[in-house]
Amino acid sequence: MKKLEGKVAVVTGASKGIGAEIARALGREGAKVVVNYATSMEGADRVVAEIVKAGGHAVAVQADVSKSADVARLFSETKRTYDRLDVLVNNAAVFKFEPLEAVTEDELQREFGTNVIGPVLAIKEAVRLFGEKGGSIINISTVATKQRMAGSLVYVASKTALEAITRVLSSELGPRGIRVNAISPGGVDTEGFAGLGATGDQMKAAFVPRTPLGRFGRPDDVAKVAVFLASDDSAWVTGENLAVSGGFN
């Protein structure tokens, strides 16, 4: 039997990169997957098609997680389609690396809106759909929260907040059978990284020499851990932040 047979999962920001691979991996293990996207309908539809082609079940739902009305609609569609929820993966995130002098109020609001407010809104909705047996919430953070990377102020601050949310809610929601964990990837080869251009190449050059396993990460490296946290294999795990980074330090 597949590890997630009969379960329903929502994955935010799942049209590409780590989120897309997590959605595919959950689907392979038997979960019915709600593939959330903000702007890339084409990418989300492609992920859904891949899951369905492999014998799974999936639907794409557009929602900007920084907006409460969109988040409510995302979970309303989940209930309408599958009538339950067991797993929430808060993967949607935005970032911009720049020095302090260039940081604007708009950028602060943009990153905190998606990276902090979004997960809180999604968790509130998810908790209403989790059944008597509880559920699993997986927040995607970053190993950068433990570093001193110049230019990463807003992004790292938002992800540090997400880690605090993970710890606090693991205690608050634990009595209801709801587990809350985080995954902190190291450098992972995704579209977002490629979009950084020369900066992305520089970051790769900085990451790999500090990674004992000697390579950059792949989305499936993270997805495998997400499957573990979504499944009953991690039934005694909550409030943890698992670094998936090849040993990066």
Image: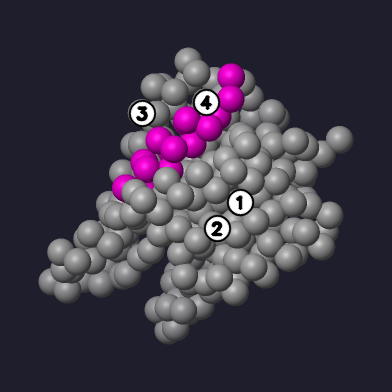
Residue labelled with disc 3: 168
Q: Is residue 131 magenta?
A: yes
Residue 173: horizontal and vertical position, in percent? 44, 23
What amino acid type should be assigned to the residue bearing mark 1?
A: Val
Q: Is residue 115 left or right of residue 183?
A: left
* Mark with earlier residue (3, 2): 2
Residue 177: horizontal and vertical position, in percent? 54, 20
Q: Secondary structure at mark 1?
A: strand
Q: Is residue 58 left or right of residue 39?
A: right
Bounds of the magenta segment: 116-132
Q: Quadrant of residue 85?
A: top right
Tell me whether circle 1 and circle 3 mark residues in contact (CB < 8 Å).
no
Q: Secondary structure at mark 2?
A: strand
Q: Residue furthest front?
A: 80
| Quadrant location, the N terminus | top right
Question: Principal SS element in the magenta part?
Answer: helix
Residue labelled with disc 2: 61
Q: Which mark is residue 178?
A: 4
- Mark 4, Cα crowd under 10 Å, few <14 / some 14-19 / many 20+, is many
- Mark 3, Cα crowd under 10 Å, few <14 / some 14-19 / many 20+, is few
* Mark with earlier residue (2, 4): 2
Q: Is residue 91 magenta?
A: no
Q: CA distance from mark 4 to mark 1?
A: 19 Å
Residue labelled with disc 1: 34
Q: Residue furthest top?
A: 175
Is residue 236 in view from this perspective? no
The residue depicted at 40 percent of the width and 35 percent of the height is 124
Residue 145: horizontal and vertical position, in percent? 36, 50
